[in-house]
Image (cartoon, rainbow, N blue to C red):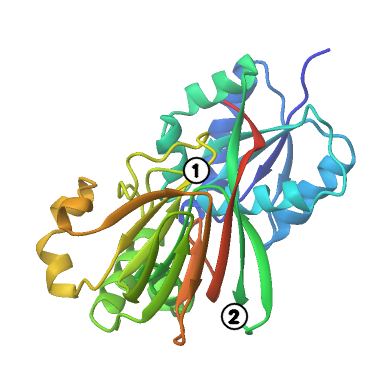
Amino acid sequence: MAQSFLFLVNPASAGGKTRNRWRRLQSLLQRNGIHPEVIWSERPGHLIDMTAEALEQGQTRIVAVGGDGTFHEVVNGWFKAKTRSDSAALGLIGSGTGGDYLRTLGLNGQWNRQIEGLIRGRIQSVDVLSLEFLNGAGQPSHCYGLNVAAFGLAGSVDRCAMQSGPLIRLLGGKAVYFWASLKCLFSYQNPVVRLNADDFEYEGPLFNAALCKGRFFGGGIPIAPPADPQSGKMRLTLFPDWHRGYVLRHIPALYRGQFEKLGGSDVETQHLSAYSDESVWIDVDGESKGTLPLKVTCLPGQLRLCY
């Protein structure tokens, strides 16, 4: 019997372009012998529930279609499911703004290779991040992350982008993120934080920190070149008391991933706790989540990917 695939599609991804792209993707799937069952996301968070429900009903191949935010929802639905088959695996089809996790897998912008992976059925177990923090209402909250969790400037940028007005949003996802980045870069004040990792401690001003299973964030910035989705640990990339002038002068080096040469730190850890007496915003897989305090654990090999 041919493998059945349930496609969970976020039409709002890629600035709303995914809805129009779907016809071309569907045709490509059918030419490769895949006749997809499709569920369309109707609202933020919808795919969390749809993923959990599908797994509880016995679905063994779910394919997320969208960007890193879409993958984030589906992964959280994966772990929300009360039951799931031991043979269940997740496929990823990229149609987003950044495509950062697929960059790490070497698959960004390559539908043919992504579909080939579904057909071939090769399964790889990858790590996920488990995060505890305070949500926007100040209540304890929890989520899972697939790619990168960041706090400091990156968290403030995502918070700003999320709160942007309708006129700004008309510019599209990348333009909104660029606008939010500039706004925050010129208004952000480095908070004092306390960090505790397995073999590393830090207390002092913080420009940004990132906990990485993938190598890229922010639409292609190589935040953690050594990161490995299957290592069992995460990379902590720490930028201490940087200021906007320093960042602006070294943008080319940042896009080459040369953080340590600029005074950043890169350590490997399985656990991290972060605290501050100030409001420090967190984002996970590009989604604004809440504030410190934060506890993060890397869960080795907990997600089966088909690619």
Q: Which residue is mark 2?
A: 136
Give the mark toward the camera: 2 or 1.
2
Left of 76 or right of it: where is 287? left
Q: Secondary structure at mark 2?
A: loop
Residue 32: quarter of image: top right
Amino acid type, mark 1: Ser
Query: What is the x, y in percent for residue 258?
Result: 20, 48
The image's mark for residue 95 is 1
Does any portion of residue 250 appear in the rendered image?
Answer: yes
Residue positioned 52% across, 40% down in the render: 21
Alpha carbon of mark 2 to alpha carbon of mark 1: how far? 28 Å
Tell me, for residue 81, which label it has, or none: none
195 sits to left or right of 63: left
**Please, is residue 221 above or below residue 124 in the view?**
below
How far across and how far down the image is residue 246, in percent? 13, 69
Q: Are marks 2 and 1 in contact (CB under 8 Å)?
A: no
Instruction: Tell which of 170 and 209 is nearer to you.
Output: 209
At horizontal 30% and vertical 71% (from top left) the residue drawn is 207
Q: Nearer the viewer, residue 213 or 231?
A: 231
Is 66 on the left or on the right of 279, as rendered? right
Q: Position of residue 292 (x, y in %)?
A: 52, 76
Please tell me whether residue 26 is drawn above or below residue 187 in the rendered image: above
Question: Could you say which is closer to the camera, residue 128 or residue 113?
Answer: 128
Quarter holding the N terminus is top right
Q: Residue furthest bottom?
A: 277
Q: Is residue 241 above or below residue 239?
A: below
Q: Residue at x 42, y 77 (%)?
A: 160
- The residue carrying pointer 1 sits among few (fewer than 14), some (14 to 19) or many (20 or more) residues within 10 Å by Cα, namely many
